[in-house]
Protein backbone atom coordinates (compact mmCIF):
# COMPACT_ATOMS: atom_id res chain seq x y z
CA UNK A 1 0.00 0.00 0.00
CA UNK A 2 1.27 3.47 -0.87
CA UNK A 3 2.49 5.47 2.13
CA UNK A 4 -0.02 8.28 1.61
CA UNK A 5 -2.83 5.72 1.95
CA UNK A 6 -1.55 4.47 5.32
CA UNK A 7 -2.27 5.96 8.73
CA UNK A 8 0.38 8.55 9.68
CA UNK A 9 2.99 7.52 12.22
CA UNK A 10 1.56 7.62 15.71
CA UNK A 11 -2.05 7.31 14.51
CA UNK A 12 -3.57 3.86 14.58
CA UNK A 13 -6.71 1.84 14.02
CA UNK A 14 -8.34 0.14 17.00
CA UNK A 15 -10.09 -3.10 16.10
CA UNK A 16 -10.52 -6.75 17.03
CA UNK A 17 -9.24 -7.80 20.46
CA UNK A 18 -7.70 -4.36 21.04
CA UNK A 19 -11.11 -2.79 20.54
CA UNK A 20 -12.75 -5.28 22.92
CA UNK A 21 -10.23 -4.31 25.62
CA UNK A 22 -10.69 -0.61 24.81
CA UNK A 23 -14.47 -0.83 25.19
CA UNK A 24 -14.15 -2.96 28.32
CA UNK A 25 -11.95 -0.30 29.93
CA UNK A 26 -14.15 2.64 28.93
CA UNK A 27 -17.41 0.95 29.94
CA UNK A 28 -15.92 -0.06 33.31
CA UNK A 29 -14.72 3.47 34.03
CA UNK A 30 -18.01 4.98 32.88
CA UNK A 31 -19.92 2.71 35.24
CA UNK A 32 -17.70 3.78 38.16
CA UNK A 33 -18.20 7.45 37.30
CA UNK A 34 -21.96 6.91 37.03
CA UNK A 35 -22.03 5.53 40.57
CA UNK A 36 -20.06 8.56 41.76
CA UNK A 37 -22.61 10.87 40.07
CA UNK A 38 -20.34 12.48 37.48
CA UNK A 39 -22.13 14.06 34.51
CA UNK A 40 -20.72 13.73 31.00
CA UNK A 41 -19.61 16.73 28.95
CA UNK A 42 -18.55 16.45 25.29
CA UNK A 43 -15.73 18.88 24.46
CA UNK A 44 -14.43 20.10 21.08
CA UNK A 45 -11.35 18.40 19.68
CA UNK A 46 -10.09 21.79 18.42
CA UNK A 47 -9.55 24.86 20.63
CA UNK A 48 -7.61 28.08 20.26
CA UNK A 49 -3.92 27.37 20.80
CA UNK A 50 -3.68 30.18 23.38
CA UNK A 51 -6.00 28.21 25.65
CA UNK A 52 -3.41 25.47 26.11
CA UNK A 53 -0.39 27.77 26.10
CA UNK A 54 -1.92 29.82 28.91
CA UNK A 55 -3.00 26.89 31.07
CA UNK A 56 -0.41 24.19 30.45
CA UNK A 57 2.53 26.61 30.38
CA UNK A 58 4.71 27.95 27.59
CA UNK A 59 7.82 26.21 28.97
CA UNK A 60 6.28 22.74 29.00
CA UNK A 61 7.23 20.08 26.46
CA UNK A 62 3.60 19.85 25.37
CA UNK A 63 3.45 23.49 24.29
CA UNK A 64 7.03 23.79 23.02
CA UNK A 65 7.28 20.52 21.10
CA UNK A 66 4.12 18.42 21.05
CA UNK A 67 1.04 20.43 20.13
CA UNK A 68 -0.52 20.12 16.68
CA UNK A 69 -1.02 23.81 15.84
CA UNK A 70 -2.44 25.21 12.60
CA UNK A 71 -4.11 28.35 11.27
CA UNK A 72 -7.66 28.59 10.00
CA UNK A 73 -8.61 30.61 6.92
CA UNK A 74 -8.68 33.82 8.95
CA UNK A 75 -5.20 33.23 10.33
CA UNK A 76 -6.34 32.28 13.84
CA UNK A 77 -4.09 29.78 15.62
CA UNK A 78 -5.94 26.59 16.52
CA UNK A 79 -4.71 23.38 18.12
CA UNK A 80 -5.81 19.79 18.40
CA UNK A 81 -6.33 19.33 22.13
CA UNK A 82 -3.31 17.76 23.88
CA UNK A 83 -5.27 17.26 27.13
CA UNK A 84 -8.78 17.77 28.44
CA UNK A 85 -8.67 19.96 31.54
CA UNK A 86 -8.15 23.27 29.74
CA UNK A 87 -11.17 22.62 27.52
CA UNK A 88 -13.28 21.56 30.49
CA UNK A 89 -12.40 24.75 32.36
CA UNK A 90 -13.14 26.82 29.26
CA UNK A 91 -16.54 25.13 28.97
CA UNK A 92 -17.23 25.69 32.68
CA UNK A 93 -16.56 29.43 32.33
CA UNK A 94 -18.08 29.96 28.88
CA UNK A 95 -21.34 28.21 29.78
CA UNK A 96 -21.47 29.90 33.20
CA UNK A 97 -21.89 26.61 35.02
CA UNK A 98 -20.72 28.38 38.16
CA UNK A 99 -24.02 30.31 38.18
CA UNK A 100 -26.12 27.13 38.22
CA UNK A 101 -25.06 25.56 41.51
CA UNK A 102 -22.30 25.48 44.10
CA UNK A 103 -20.21 22.70 42.55
CA UNK A 104 -20.08 20.51 39.46
CA UNK A 105 -18.71 17.01 38.85
CA UNK A 106 -18.14 16.31 35.16
CA UNK A 107 -16.28 13.81 32.99
CA UNK A 108 -15.24 13.69 29.34
CA UNK A 109 -13.98 11.00 26.99
CA UNK A 110 -12.22 11.26 23.66
CA UNK A 111 -9.02 11.54 21.61
CA UNK A 112 -6.07 13.76 22.53
CA UNK A 113 -3.15 14.68 20.27
CA UNK A 114 0.55 15.12 21.03
CA UNK A 115 3.41 15.06 18.54
CA UNK A 116 5.72 12.90 20.65
CA UNK A 117 7.64 9.72 20.02
CA UNK A 118 5.12 6.85 19.85
CA UNK A 119 5.57 4.37 22.68
CA UNK A 120 3.72 1.57 24.43
CA UNK A 121 0.16 2.69 25.00
CA UNK A 122 0.82 6.28 23.93
CA UNK A 123 0.34 7.33 20.34
CA UNK A 124 0.13 10.75 18.73
CA UNK A 125 -3.60 10.27 18.83
CA UNK A 126 -4.51 8.67 22.14
CA UNK A 127 -7.66 8.52 24.24
CA UNK A 128 -8.46 9.66 27.75
CA UNK A 129 -11.34 9.69 30.18
CA UNK A 130 -10.99 12.65 32.49
CA UNK A 131 -12.93 13.86 35.54
CA UNK A 132 -13.14 17.38 36.91
CA UNK A 133 -14.70 18.70 40.14
CA UNK A 134 -15.38 22.44 40.19
CA UNK A 135 -16.18 24.51 43.27
CA UNK A 136 -14.86 22.38 46.14
CA UNK A 137 -11.74 23.36 48.11
CA UNK A 138 -11.98 20.81 50.91
CA UNK A 139 -9.48 17.93 50.96
CA UNK A 140 -12.18 15.27 51.20
CA UNK A 141 -12.93 16.06 47.54
CA UNK A 142 -9.30 15.25 46.73
CA UNK A 143 -9.64 11.99 48.64
CA UNK A 144 -12.80 11.01 46.77
CA UNK A 145 -11.25 11.77 43.39
CA UNK A 146 -8.20 9.66 44.23
CA UNK A 147 -10.56 6.95 45.49
CA UNK A 148 -12.22 6.91 42.05
CA UNK A 149 -8.81 6.36 40.44
CA UNK A 150 -8.10 3.58 42.94
CA UNK A 151 -11.48 1.98 42.21
CA UNK A 152 -10.69 1.95 38.48
CA UNK A 153 -7.49 -0.08 38.86
CA UNK A 154 -9.05 -2.33 41.51
CA UNK A 155 -12.09 -3.10 39.34
CA UNK A 156 -9.92 -3.77 36.30
CA UNK A 157 -7.55 -5.90 38.44
CA UNK A 158 -4.49 -3.82 37.52
CA UNK A 159 -1.37 -3.78 39.68
CA UNK A 160 -0.52 -0.14 40.34
CA UNK A 161 0.80 2.22 43.02
CA UNK A 162 -0.77 5.54 43.98
CA UNK A 163 1.75 8.31 44.57
CA UNK A 164 0.74 11.65 46.13
CA UNK A 165 2.40 14.94 46.95
CA UNK A 166 1.54 18.58 47.64
CA UNK A 167 3.24 21.33 45.64
CA UNK A 168 1.82 24.19 47.68
CA UNK A 169 0.09 27.35 46.58
CA UNK A 170 0.87 30.96 45.60
CA UNK A 171 1.66 31.75 49.23
CA UNK A 172 4.29 29.10 49.95
CA UNK A 173 5.64 28.10 46.57
CA UNK A 174 7.86 31.17 46.00
CA UNK A 175 10.03 30.30 49.03
CA UNK A 176 10.33 26.73 47.83
CA UNK A 177 11.14 27.85 44.31
CA UNK A 178 13.98 30.01 45.62
CA UNK A 179 15.41 27.13 47.66
CA UNK A 180 15.09 24.71 44.75
CA UNK A 181 16.80 27.06 42.27
CA UNK A 182 19.68 27.49 44.72
CA UNK A 183 20.06 23.74 45.00
CA UNK A 184 19.83 23.19 41.24
CA UNK A 185 22.53 25.77 40.65
CA UNK A 186 24.80 23.74 42.95
CA UNK A 187 24.31 20.58 40.86
CA UNK A 188 23.96 22.22 37.46
CA UNK A 189 26.86 20.23 35.99
CA UNK A 190 24.75 17.06 36.40
CA UNK A 191 21.66 18.45 34.69
CA UNK A 192 20.73 17.74 31.08
CA UNK A 193 20.56 20.65 28.61
CA UNK A 194 16.76 20.80 28.85
CA UNK A 195 16.83 21.05 32.65
CA UNK A 196 19.54 23.70 32.55
CA UNK A 197 17.00 25.80 30.67
CA UNK A 198 14.16 24.76 32.97
CA UNK A 199 15.88 25.49 36.27
CA UNK A 200 15.41 29.25 36.01
CA UNK A 201 12.10 29.38 34.13
CA UNK A 202 10.22 26.42 35.62
CA UNK A 203 12.44 24.70 38.21
CA UNK A 204 9.79 22.28 39.49
CA UNK A 205 9.85 20.58 36.08
CA UNK A 206 13.44 19.48 36.74
CA UNK A 207 12.09 17.19 39.46
CA UNK A 208 9.97 15.50 36.80
CA UNK A 209 12.85 14.82 34.37
CA UNK A 210 13.33 11.19 33.32
CA UNK A 211 17.03 11.55 32.36
CA UNK A 212 19.08 9.39 34.75
CA UNK A 213 21.67 12.06 35.57
CA UNK A 214 18.92 14.51 36.46
CA UNK A 215 17.08 11.92 38.55
CA UNK A 216 20.30 11.31 40.47
CA UNK A 217 21.01 15.03 40.84
CA UNK A 218 17.66 15.86 42.46
CA UNK A 219 17.66 13.03 45.01
CA UNK A 220 18.83 15.44 47.73
CA UNK A 221 16.79 18.39 46.49
CA UNK A 222 14.67 20.31 49.04
CA UNK A 223 11.23 18.80 49.57
CA UNK A 224 8.29 21.00 48.75
CA UNK A 225 6.35 19.62 51.72
CA UNK A 226 8.95 21.20 54.04
CA UNK A 227 7.97 24.64 52.72
CA UNK A 228 4.18 24.37 52.82
CA UNK A 229 2.22 27.18 54.44
CA UNK A 230 -0.10 26.31 57.31
CA UNK A 231 -3.19 25.99 55.09
CA UNK A 232 -1.44 23.73 52.55
CA UNK A 233 0.10 21.64 55.30
CA UNK A 234 -3.33 21.18 56.93
CA UNK A 235 -4.90 20.31 53.55
CA UNK A 236 -2.24 17.69 52.85
CA UNK A 237 -2.50 16.21 56.35
CA UNK A 238 -6.27 15.86 56.08
CA UNK A 239 -5.96 14.31 52.62
CA UNK A 240 -3.72 11.61 54.08
CA UNK A 241 -6.21 11.06 56.90
CA UNK A 242 -9.16 10.75 54.52
CA UNK A 243 -7.37 8.37 52.16
CA UNK A 244 -6.64 6.09 55.11
CA UNK A 245 -10.30 6.28 56.13
CA UNK A 246 -11.29 5.21 52.60
CA UNK A 247 -8.78 2.36 52.63
CA UNK A 248 -6.84 3.76 49.66
CA UNK A 249 -3.17 2.66 49.76
CA UNK A 250 -0.69 5.33 48.73
CA UNK A 251 2.95 6.38 48.99
CA UNK A 252 4.28 9.91 49.31
CA UNK A 253 6.59 10.96 46.50
CA UNK A 254 8.33 14.27 47.33
CA UNK A 255 9.53 14.64 43.72
CA UNK A 256 6.10 14.29 42.15
CA UNK A 257 5.16 17.64 40.59
CA UNK A 258 3.30 16.76 37.35
CA UNK A 259 4.30 18.33 34.06
CA UNK A 260 1.67 21.06 33.73
CA UNK A 261 1.85 24.57 35.17
CA UNK A 262 -1.71 24.84 36.44
CA UNK A 263 -1.44 22.41 39.38
CA UNK A 264 -1.61 23.57 43.01
CA UNK A 265 -1.52 21.64 46.29
CA UNK A 266 -2.51 18.01 45.67
CA UNK A 267 -0.90 16.12 42.79
CA UNK A 268 -1.06 12.36 42.29
CA UNK A 269 -0.26 9.59 39.86
CA UNK A 270 -1.35 5.98 39.55
CA UNK A 271 1.81 4.26 38.34
CA UNK A 272 2.00 0.83 36.72
CA UNK A 273 5.20 -1.06 37.63
CA UNK A 274 4.69 -3.19 34.52
CA UNK A 275 4.73 -0.16 32.20
CA UNK A 276 6.98 2.00 34.34
CA UNK A 277 4.72 4.99 33.74
CA UNK A 278 1.55 6.65 34.98
CA UNK A 279 -1.78 5.37 33.70
CA UNK A 280 -3.90 7.88 35.67
CA UNK A 281 -2.70 11.28 36.85
CA UNK A 282 -4.11 14.53 38.13
CA UNK A 283 -4.38 16.98 40.94
CA UNK A 284 -5.78 20.30 42.10
CA UNK A 285 -5.78 23.52 40.04
CA UNK A 286 -7.40 26.20 42.18
CA UNK A 287 -6.43 29.25 40.07
CA UNK A 288 -7.19 28.13 36.53
CA UNK A 289 -10.91 29.02 36.40
CA UNK A 290 -10.12 32.56 37.50
CA UNK A 291 -7.32 32.84 34.92
CA UNK A 292 -9.87 31.94 32.23
CA UNK A 293 -12.15 34.79 33.29
CA UNK A 294 -14.38 32.97 35.74
CA UNK A 295 -14.88 33.64 39.44
CA UNK A 296 -12.32 32.28 41.94
CA UNK A 297 -13.13 28.57 41.86
CA UNK A 298 -11.17 25.71 43.44
CA UNK A 299 -11.04 22.65 41.19
CA UNK A 300 -9.37 19.30 40.75
CA UNK A 301 -9.44 16.24 38.51
CA UNK A 302 -7.52 13.50 36.72
CA UNK A 303 -7.15 11.88 33.32
CA UNK A 304 -6.91 8.15 32.63
CA UNK A 305 -5.05 6.92 29.55
CA UNK A 306 -7.26 4.32 27.87
CA UNK A 307 -4.62 2.69 25.64
CA UNK A 308 -2.16 2.35 28.50
CA UNK A 309 -4.77 0.83 30.79
CA UNK A 310 -5.92 -1.52 28.02
CA UNK A 311 -2.38 -2.93 27.81
CA UNK A 312 -2.73 -4.12 31.41
CA UNK A 313 -6.13 -5.81 31.34
CA UNK A 314 -7.06 -9.27 30.20
CA UNK A 315 -9.53 -9.62 27.36
CA UNK A 316 -12.96 -10.18 28.89
CA UNK A 317 -13.78 -13.88 28.67
CA UNK A 318 -17.53 -13.49 28.61
CA UNK A 319 -18.87 -12.54 25.20
CA UNK A 320 -22.50 -12.01 24.38
CA UNK A 321 -23.70 -15.13 22.52
CA UNK A 322 -24.19 -14.66 18.77
CA UNK A 323 -26.99 -16.39 16.85
CA UNK A 324 -25.73 -17.18 13.33
CA UNK A 325 -28.69 -17.54 10.96
CA UNK A 326 -27.90 -19.90 8.05
CA UNK A 327 -30.45 -19.86 5.17
CA UNK A 328 -30.79 -22.74 2.66
CA UNK A 329 -32.99 -22.62 -0.42
CA UNK A 330 -35.50 -19.95 -1.35
CA UNK A 331 -35.99 -18.77 2.24
CA UNK A 332 -34.37 -15.33 2.39
CA UNK A 333 -37.57 -13.41 3.32
CA UNK A 334 -38.21 -15.88 6.16
CA UNK A 335 -34.54 -15.83 7.25
CA UNK A 336 -34.61 -12.03 7.37
CA UNK A 337 -37.71 -12.16 9.56
CA UNK A 338 -36.12 -14.79 11.84
CA UNK A 339 -33.00 -12.67 12.24
CA UNK A 340 -35.06 -9.59 13.02
CA UNK A 341 -37.14 -11.51 15.58
CA UNK A 342 -34.00 -12.62 17.44
CA UNK A 343 -32.68 -9.04 17.51
CA UNK A 344 -36.03 -7.72 18.77
CA UNK A 345 -35.60 -10.05 21.75
CA UNK A 346 -32.40 -8.17 22.63
CA UNK A 347 -30.02 -10.83 21.35
CA UNK A 348 -27.15 -10.56 18.86
CA UNK A 349 -27.96 -12.11 15.48
CA UNK A 350 -25.94 -12.36 12.28
CA UNK A 351 -27.52 -13.41 8.97
CA UNK A 352 -24.98 -15.38 6.94
CA UNK A 353 -24.02 -13.88 3.60
CA UNK A 354 -21.71 -16.82 2.89
CA UNK A 355 -22.23 -19.52 0.31
CA UNK A 356 -21.44 -23.16 0.89
CA UNK A 357 -22.85 -26.35 2.36
CA UNK A 358 -23.99 -26.69 5.95
CA UNK A 359 -20.67 -28.11 7.14
CA UNK A 360 -18.74 -25.10 5.81
CA UNK A 361 -21.24 -22.72 7.37
CA UNK A 362 -20.99 -24.45 10.76
CA UNK A 363 -17.19 -24.50 10.53
CA UNK A 364 -17.25 -20.76 9.96
CA UNK A 365 -19.61 -20.21 12.91
CA UNK A 366 -17.31 -22.27 15.11
CA UNK A 367 -14.22 -20.37 13.92
CA UNK A 368 -15.88 -17.04 14.70
CA UNK A 369 -16.87 -18.21 18.17
CA UNK A 370 -20.61 -17.93 17.52
CA UNK A 371 -22.55 -19.76 20.21
CA UNK A 372 -25.63 -20.77 18.22
CA UNK A 373 -26.34 -21.72 14.61
CA UNK A 374 -29.91 -21.00 13.51
CA UNK A 375 -30.54 -23.22 10.48
CA UNK A 376 -33.36 -22.06 8.20
CA UNK A 377 -34.36 -24.35 5.34
CA UNK A 378 -37.51 -24.75 3.31
CA UNK A 379 -38.87 -27.36 5.72
CA UNK A 380 -38.34 -24.99 8.66
CA UNK A 381 -40.02 -22.16 6.76
CA UNK A 382 -43.11 -24.29 5.99
CA UNK A 383 -43.43 -25.27 9.66
CA UNK A 384 -42.67 -21.76 10.99
CA UNK A 385 -39.67 -22.96 13.03
CA UNK A 386 -35.86 -22.97 12.96
CA UNK A 387 -33.28 -25.63 13.79
CA UNK A 388 -31.26 -24.22 16.70
CA UNK A 389 -27.84 -25.79 17.21
CA UNK A 390 -25.72 -25.15 20.32
CA UNK A 391 -22.17 -24.97 18.95
CA UNK A 392 -20.64 -25.86 22.32
CA UNK A 393 -22.71 -28.92 23.23
CA UNK A 394 -23.77 -30.04 19.74
CA UNK A 395 -27.42 -30.23 20.88
CA UNK A 396 -29.94 -29.31 18.19
CA UNK A 397 -33.65 -28.62 18.60
CA UNK A 398 -36.52 -27.20 16.54
CA UNK A 399 -38.15 -24.09 18.03
CA UNK A 400 -40.25 -21.19 16.90
CA UNK A 401 -38.15 -18.04 16.39
CA UNK A 402 -40.12 -16.14 19.02
CA UNK A 403 -39.34 -18.89 21.56
CA UNK A 404 -35.55 -18.63 21.25
Image (cartoon, grey):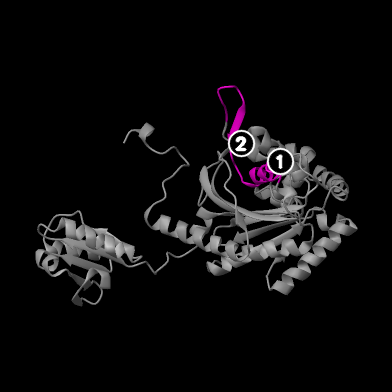
Residue 54 location, x and y as percent? Answer: 72, 37
Residue 22 in the figure: left or right of residue 227: left
Tell me what residue is drawn at x 41 percent, y 39 percent. Answer: 7
Please tell me whether residue 192 belongs to the stretch shown in magenta. Answer: no
Residue 223 in sight here: no
- Residue 47: mark: 2
In the image shown, does 144 or 66 lie closer to the viewer?
144
Q: Is residue 210 above or below residue 8?
A: below
Residue 332 in sight here: yes
Please tell me whether residue 89 belongs to the stretch shown in magenta. Answer: yes
Image quarter (top left, top right, bottom left or bottom right) of the N terminus: top left
Q: CA distance from mark 1 to mark 2?
A: 12 Å
**Count of all numbered marks drawn on residues in the image:** 2
Disc 1: which residue: 55
Q: Is residue 353 above or below residue 377?
A: above
Q: Earlier in the sequence, mark 1 or mark 2?
A: 2
Task: Kindly state the secondary structure of the residue where label 2 is placed.
Answer: strand
Q: Is residue 130 above or below residue 345?
A: above
Front label number (1 vs 2): 2
Disc 1 vs disc 2: Cβ atoms closer than 8 Å?
no
In the image shown, does 221 or 364 lie closer to the viewer?
364
Tell me what residue is drawn at x 39 percent, y 58 percent. Answer: 17
In the image shown, does 20 or 136 lie closer to the viewer?
136
For label 2, count other residues whose C-alpha is less than 10 Å away and answer few (under 14), some (14-19) or many (20+): some
Which residues, given as a range, are shown in magenta? 70-96
Amino acid sequence: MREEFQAPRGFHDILGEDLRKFRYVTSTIRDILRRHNFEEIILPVVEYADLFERSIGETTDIVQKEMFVFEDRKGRRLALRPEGTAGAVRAYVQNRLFAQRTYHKVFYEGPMFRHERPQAGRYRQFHQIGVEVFGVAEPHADAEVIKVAHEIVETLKIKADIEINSIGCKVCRPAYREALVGYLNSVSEKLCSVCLDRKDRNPLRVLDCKVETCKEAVKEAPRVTDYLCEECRDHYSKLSEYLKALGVPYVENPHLVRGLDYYTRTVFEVVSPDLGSAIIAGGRYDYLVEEFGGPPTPALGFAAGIERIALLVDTPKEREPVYFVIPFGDVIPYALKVTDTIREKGKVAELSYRKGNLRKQLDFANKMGYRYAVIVGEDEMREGVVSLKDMETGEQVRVRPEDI
